[in-house]
Amino acid sequence: MTGNPTSRDHNKAAVLDVVLSRAPLTRTEVMEQTGLSKATVSRAVEELRADGFVVDGGLDDATGRGRRSTYLDVPDTAGHVVGVSFGAQDTCVLAADLRGRDIGRVLRPTVEHHDAAAAARWLVDMVGDVTKGAKGPLREVVVAVPGRVRSGAEILGPAEAMKALVGPDLQRTLAARLGARVEFDSDANASLLGILTEGRAIGNAALFSLSSILNFASCADHVLDRGRTPTFGDLGVLWSGVPGESLEGLMSTGGLLRFARLRDPDVQRVEDLWLDAGSQASRPEVLDALTTALVTAVSAVAVTLEPDRVYFVGRLQPLVEEVLPMVRRRLGERLPKAPEVSTPTQVLGLSVARGAVYACLATVREELRESVLSTRHRSADPAGSAPAY
């Protein structure tokens, strides 16, 4: 028997793709999305039902003559994924089923950890809290951190409070304790992936995350460009346009707080810059410095990557929103064609965790598709034991 996938395998994989990404939906909707015939869809659905990836949901509302259609859905037992926003100040853990629907979530202040083992124990407990009612296997965990990540495992240049976690030990320990695949990524990549998933018209874009550190992500043709992130990983060391200040020094919470305190020692927290604005005589200077840094950062990526859009997210977002009109004006004066700059609606911690969930789902869905296509290659009996996926 040949090991090559048959047209029947490809049809089944196409139906699985649609069900995982769009359920609940009817067979008619599956036919419309795949272009397959009614008989082909029905056969694929029954095979996927036997594999444990499709169940009947409710009935649709009849709008005309004929029988009401049964919705197809993804069962809880098909498994789940977990996205983690592991920040320097707060950590959010979000669990979702394979359709992307929330199972549970938790947000807690990040505890200071002096080694990877302690951090892993703490994160495992949080994952356990949000998945205790989940069914099926934990298929993947993606952890987004304020730093750069190499090869999905090694943390590079994290926030100061997380320096003890540099290297691959945390990823290895988490994977061993959870018994599941664990990938690490930057918080900027997770944020941008969330925006891309929910905004399908976005083509080329860049994102700056202004929180405990300055982090960066970009995409081309709607695809996250992970290869560019290390290239621009040291963007923060560039001169900001303000004498003596780097981009990191003005586009991170610690850096901007230091800059503000040098001019007004009464500023206690970075949040005071927008929550207690009226009492700060130096505030105009701080806002002007931040504006200059933002213009410099956008200009640096605009001439290299030519993004259509640039997003600013992170803890400094309230200040960025305040200076954004001036940023747009200066960019219009400096660049022949300035990108659109904006601050998308984000929930601190949760938006990054949701982006991490999207990363999980993309990987798991592709893995399941490949499993459907390779099942016959693994077994000489297509009607034999349950699939390996």
Image: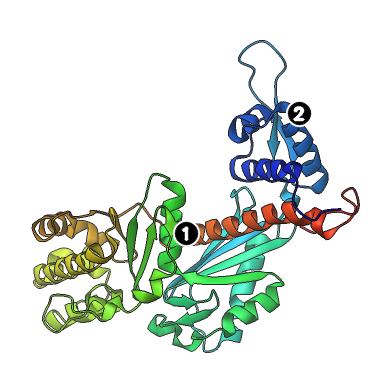
Q: Position of residue 219 (x, y in %)?
A: 39, 59
Secondary structure of the residue carrying tag 2 is helix
Residue 48 image-quadrant placement: top right
Secondary structure of the residue carrying tag 1 is helix
Give the residue at x 14% y 79%: 264
Please determine whether, in this image, residue 315 is positioned above or below residue 163: above
The answer to whether residue 220 is left or right of residue 274 is: right
Instruction: Give the CA distance from mark 1 to mark 2.
Output: 42 Å
Q: Nearer the viewer, residue 384 or 155?
A: 384
Amino acid type for the residue under numbered disc 2: Ala
> Badge 1 is on which residue?
350
The numbered dot on residue 160 is none
Please determine whether, in this image, residue 164 is positioned above or below residue 386: below
Question: Label 1 crowding class (10 Å Cα cut-off): few <14, some 14-19, many 20+?
Answer: many
Q: Position of residue 90 (x, y in %)?
A: 45, 70
> Badge 2 is on which residue?
39
Q: Nearer the viewer, residue 276 or 98?
A: 98
Q: Position of residue 132 (x, y in %)?
A: 70, 61
Give the residue at x 55% y 58%: 357
Question: Label 2 crowding class (10 Å Cα cut-off): few <14, some 14-19, many 20+?
Answer: few
Q: Position of residue 6 (x, y in %)?
A: 75, 46
Give the residue at x 48% y 88%: 164
Residue 143 image-quadrant placement: bottom right
Q: Nearer the viewer, residue 258 or 236?
A: 236
